[in-house]
Amino acid sequence: MPKLQVVDPVIFRVAIPVPVYRLFDYLAPADLDLKAIKPGVRLEVPFGKSKKIAYLLEITQQSDIDVTKLKPIIRVLDQQSLLSSKDLRLLQWASDYYQHPLGEVISTAFPTALRQGKPAELKVEKRYCLTELGKAIDSTDLKRTPKQKNLIDKFRVREQPSLSETELAEWNSHWRPSLNLLITKQLLMPCEVNTPYVALKTVLRNQPLICNPQQKTAIDSVCGHLGSFKAFLLEGITGSGKTEVYLQIIQAVLEQGLQVLVLVPEITLTPQLEERFKQRFAVNIAISHSKLTDKQRQIAWLQMQTGQCSIMLGTRSALFTPLKRPGLIILDEEHDGSFKQQEGFRFSARDVALVRAKSLAIPVVLGSATPSLESLHNAQRQRYELLHLPERAGNSIEPELQLLDIRNKGIQEGLSDALIAEMHKTLVKNEQVLLFLNRRGFAPTLICHSCGWVARCLRCDANLVIHYDEARLRCHHCAQEQVLLKQCPDCKGGQLTPLGLGTERVERVLADLFADKVTVRLDRDTTQRKGTLEKYLQQINAGAVDIILGTQMLAKGHHFPNVTLVAILDVDSGLFSIDFHAAEKMAQMIVQVAGRAGRADKLGKVIMQTRHPEHPLLTKLITEGYNSFAQTVLVERKDAALPPYSYQALLRVQSLEPEAPKLFFQALSALMQNINSGHTLILGPVVAPMAKRAGQYRYQLLFQNTRRNELQGFLKTLMPEITKLKQAKKVRWSLDVDPVDLY
Ligand code: ADP
Ligand code: ZN
Ligand code: ZN
């Protein structure tokens, strides 16, 4: 009888995107060539009654589970890992730091299509190039067929060997007939597909601008550190030429044949930026944001992963895109709250970008006109090198900021008489006015004039907002809405009155006061349909609009060169919040909105209506500027031991049952007594600032420690224990490390 050979089982330890803090073991198929399989590859595995995509982390021979109970995997999806070992380690770090299950963290690094197990192939497009004859002829020979001449010139000015169908379609939608004719004439030919990356003789399509000395210093500082990690904070007022600085640093990186990752808060709002990149560089640029299809995002991701594209311009989720030849990371508008993910894996793209740059040994540049207090603090501690652009580039002039005291003054629907007079003065000169009010709808409250009844959301601790345009009452916190009531449902007789101010209401008064002027309102309600925002922006730039009215949408990215008067209708709303972040956010908003004015060579004016003209933070901001303001707030934060002088994590708990959170906190409290070494402050639990939302009763508990490591250690022990609490099953809970708002 032949001797039975006992072979140790080979076990795959994998992460699966499910909300549990553990890994899973599976058996490797016996016939697999293990040498070819590396951590990071995607696998398909049986999971309960279904199948899931899993990520291989380790090949081992030991399991805590009885090996005979382990199931074999179904199949291996990738020949080789799509993520580098450095990026895999980064994800592991992020999972630890944000206390979020590793499987879910890894899966956020992939585009949806790959998460679903689709093959990681780049379907290669047809490409075309010049034949020898095409290179040799004089294109003026084609002058009687101008379309063909244009097309051949397009090929000849390019340093790149070929053009893809997409690139041709982007250039001119009627490219194909001319192309076919040129192929018949043997001047063009289809060429080798799957062209590998080729270093270009010149990466430039257009020449850079001539820099001012501050720009030059900034560019030289970063370029002096290519190839090693260093963090830079580029602080420059709007219009000071930050983008030009990015472009010239990027140029240096591209000339070394390396790739650049550029993150922006909201890409749909910055088509101008994309355009400037395309104007400047001859390299392939990948775009990634949530408005693209899954397929488009997968292509962009793979083009960076394989190195076919040299620049990725994307939003928060693009941070984890693998880079074949990493060279530089840039985060523009680094102060922007959208860099923090607010659900699920609550990571800060800014903070993780720093860790990623360090692990890849490349520089990272954070840019803003209004840097976050964290970043300014890091610059003070010399962890970041501060680069400063204090003046507007070119010949444009900085706007003048002015507080307008509206106490006891005549006011119509939020517009004071003094402001209306200023608006007239501006409009007479054929210049544009921008009005900022960060509240959409007609009015935030509907109240009964005789009994005081207020229209409340039944599911939230919030008032319903009046939307007159559609005759609806809407909750801005859940999906609840109803028709606009005509009569008080309580006293049946009372007259219902709108209270407070929203953009719709201002729009109506503008139509009365400035009947012969054109107003556009830009907020979420008016720009929902695809393309409407672009349409409005075009009209504004073409000078077809006199008054622009809008919400925070106006604070981001757009340049309105003909706007010479900006008014912030209600600065006070940011002054009295219970969240300590509010003052910082208010100041950033004011400066960002102010930066939209007078971009060309016309002097701009910024008026802020307030009932607190002596408020120390406001006056500081107006008289001494954002940086002084920020230093003052930093001192306050230091005195109160608030971030960035301490570290926080917020545990949010909610349930449809009012009692369930309380029972959960009782159990948690017992648990924490055993874990806390005593240095982590535990503040709460308290009722959340919005006590009820979408029918859920909400509570929160804040952890705070002046030492990051101690807080981390505490959370790391606590999290797995919470998942074991039976009271945790009755509530929905989540942990937010480094929360940016305490709601
Ligand atoms: P930011 O990104 O800081 O708002 P930009 O880079 O967009 O600033 O520059 C603002 C304007 O000034 C743009 O129109 C840009 O073309 C122009 N600009 C920037 N740098 C220079 C320069 N060195 N010389 C002339 N114009 C410049
Ligand atoms: Zn009433
Ligand atoms: Zn609601």
Image (cartoon, rainbow, N blue to C red):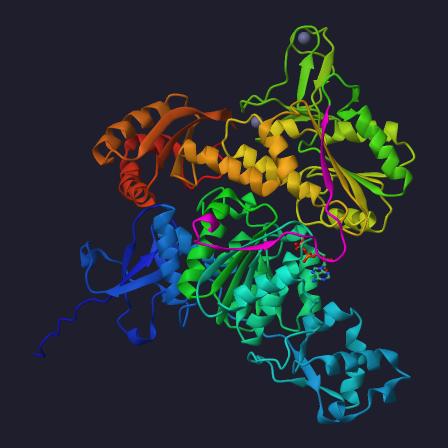
Which quadrant of the render holds ligand 1? bottom right
Percent from the top left, x then y, of residue 391? 67, 52
Left or right of residue 597: residue 669: left
Above or below, 344 relative to 617 = below
Above or below, 240 relative to 342 = below
Where residue 215 sits, quadrant-wise, is: bottom right
Q: Is residue 622 visible?
A: yes
Percent from the top left, x then y, of residue 638? 42, 36
Q: Residue at x 70, y 26 (%)?
A: 472
Percent from the top left, x then y, of residue 278? 68, 66
Q: Is residue 695 visible?
A: no
Residue 426 vs residue 352, the one in the foreground: 426
Left or right of residue 213: residue 404: right
Residue 480 vs residue 213, the one in the foreground: 213
What residue range appears in magenta?
379-405
Percent from the top left, x then y, of residue 623? 65, 36
Q: Residue at x 19, y 61 (%)?
A: 62
Q: Is residue 387 magenta?
A: yes
Q: Is residue 60 magenta?
A: no
Residue 210 vs residue 66, the one in the foreground: 210
